[in-house]
Image: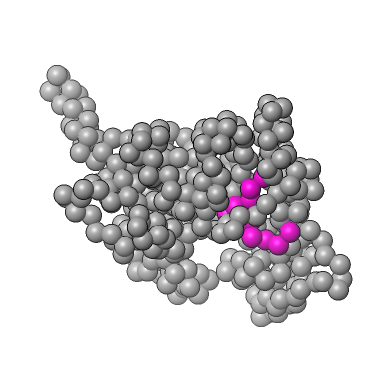
């Protein structure tokens, strides 16, 4: 007996897919801790709602940075809390878990990710490149011999891949994505308006008025943002419009487009022809900034299509790809928890006993 679980362990959000039930969880990848005891007092949305509003002795942290684990213990506890909300591991039920990871994740980072999930689920872990999984979740057919290209703008990384016949042929992962957009907005308001705002305020402003192309005056949207005046320390509110946020984010958009261009330059002419015919699929929460598809299309001279559910494509892809376990198509199979324990005991015996 087995249960199939797909996990999008993102820098910004954790999403979980259970076979037969679909997406069962979507929560911010955040924990709030008591700094005196190091105990976690809130997970997910309740912790996120504390951002910028915590009293002394409480800290809100993101355990994952740039698509990889930054704080192992906190990531493990966050995962355990999230998984136990939707599934309680049982000794007689084997779990198959598929996770999407950035294409340039190191072996150490990969092993940390596997171990964190493994400790919680006691299952068999599979790792696939995030852009590939996202492509499947957006509707790309991996059995199609024609090449497809995916640009996935997440919270911590932007993952770019060219896929052909089920394999990633060329790929890149850039640590520049949605969370960095928030920080650039914070820096812009500080430099240009002497206004200090928190991450939540910057994110809300991004969602309200951001654009990836400059807008004509009559099409501008405005939003109010409040923070501290850096001149006198008093509260201050400003109305900010779309083109101001475009100015703050423009260079980041260009860097992502340049990275996509580099991946395209590596592709064979036949693959380029396929991509021109099919277009590039754009996925991820960061891709939801209005006109991002048009910006990339203008820069790359190729049609760019925003996925139908851009924020959910990775976890939807895990739900579809995990069916491949039965056919042996998932190349990322890892040792089960029991096998890993046995392996470590053998290592210990060789080191201590000598055989």
Q: Quadrant of the C terminus?
A: top left
In the rendered view, does 303 fall on the left or right side of 143? right
User: Picture coordinates of residue 218 (x, y %)?
Assistant: 86, 73
* Image location of residue 41, percent across then percent down: 35, 69
- Residue lying at the far front in this picture: please name it: 144
- Side of 144 where 321 appears, left or right: left
**Residue visible at 24% across and 35% down in the picture:** 340
- Residue under the point 22% across and 34% down: 339
User: Taking 54 as reference, is 324 above or below it?
Assistant: above
Examine the structure image and report whether residue 285 is included in the region drawn in magenta. Answer: yes
Residue 64: tell me if it is visible. Answer: no
Scheme of colours in the image: one colour
Magenta residue span: 280-291
**Is residue 91 shown to the viewer in this render?**
yes
The one of 151 and 74 positioned closer to us in this rendering: 151
What is the tally of numbered marks visible in this picture? 0
Q: Camera-side residue: 130 or 69? A: 130
Task: Give the residue at x 49% y 40%.
Answer: 129
Relative to 318, residue 286 above or below: below
Q: Residue 158: x, y in percent?
A: 60, 47
Identify which residue, 271 or 296, lies in the foreground.
Answer: 271
Is 283 situated left or right of 21 in this image? right
């Amino acid at each position: 007996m087995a249960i199939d679980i797909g996990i999008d362990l993102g820098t910004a959000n954790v999403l979980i897919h259970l076979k037969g039930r679909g997406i069962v969880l979507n929560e911010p990848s955040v924990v709030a801790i008591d700094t005196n005891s190091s105990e976690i007092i809130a997970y997910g949305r309740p912790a996120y709602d504390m951002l910028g509003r915590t009293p002394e002795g409480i800290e809100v942290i993101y355990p994952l940075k740039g698509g990889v684990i930054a704080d192992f213990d906190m990531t493990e506890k966050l995962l355990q809390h999230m998984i136990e909300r939707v599934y309680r591991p049982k000794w007689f039920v084997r779990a198959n878990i598929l996770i999407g990871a950035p294409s340039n994740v190191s072996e150490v980072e990969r092993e940390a990710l596997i171990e964190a999930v493994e400790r919680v689920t006691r299952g068999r872990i599979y790792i696939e490149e995030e852009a590939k999984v996202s492509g499947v979740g957006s509707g790309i057919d991996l059995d199609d011999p024609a090449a497809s290209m995916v640009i996935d703008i997440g919270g911590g990384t932007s993952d770019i891949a060219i896929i052909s016949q089920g394999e990633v042929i060329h790929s890149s992962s850039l640590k520049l994505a949605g969370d960095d957009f928030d920080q650039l907005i914070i820096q812009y308001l500080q430099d240009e308006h002497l206004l200090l705002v928190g991450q939540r305020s910057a994110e809300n402003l991004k969602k309200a008025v951001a654009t990836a192309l400059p807008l004509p005056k009559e099409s501008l949207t405005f939003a109010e943002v409040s923070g501290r005046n850096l001149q006198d320390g008093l509260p201050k509110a400003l109305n900010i419009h779309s083109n101001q946020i475009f100015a703050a984010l423009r260079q980041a958009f260009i860097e992502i487009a340049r990275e996509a261009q580099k991946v395209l330059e590596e592709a064979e002419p036949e693959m380029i022809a396929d991509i021109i015919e099919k277009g590039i699929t754009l996925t991820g929460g960061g891709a939801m900034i209005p006109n991002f598809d048009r910006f990339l299309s203008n820069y790359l001279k190729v049609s760019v299509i925003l996925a139908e559910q851009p924020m959910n494509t990775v976890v939807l892809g895990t739900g579809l790809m995990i069916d491949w376990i039965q056919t042996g198509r998932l190349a990322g199979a890892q040792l089960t928890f029991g096998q890993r324990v046995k392996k470590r005991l053998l290592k210990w015996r060789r080191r201590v006993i000598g055989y």
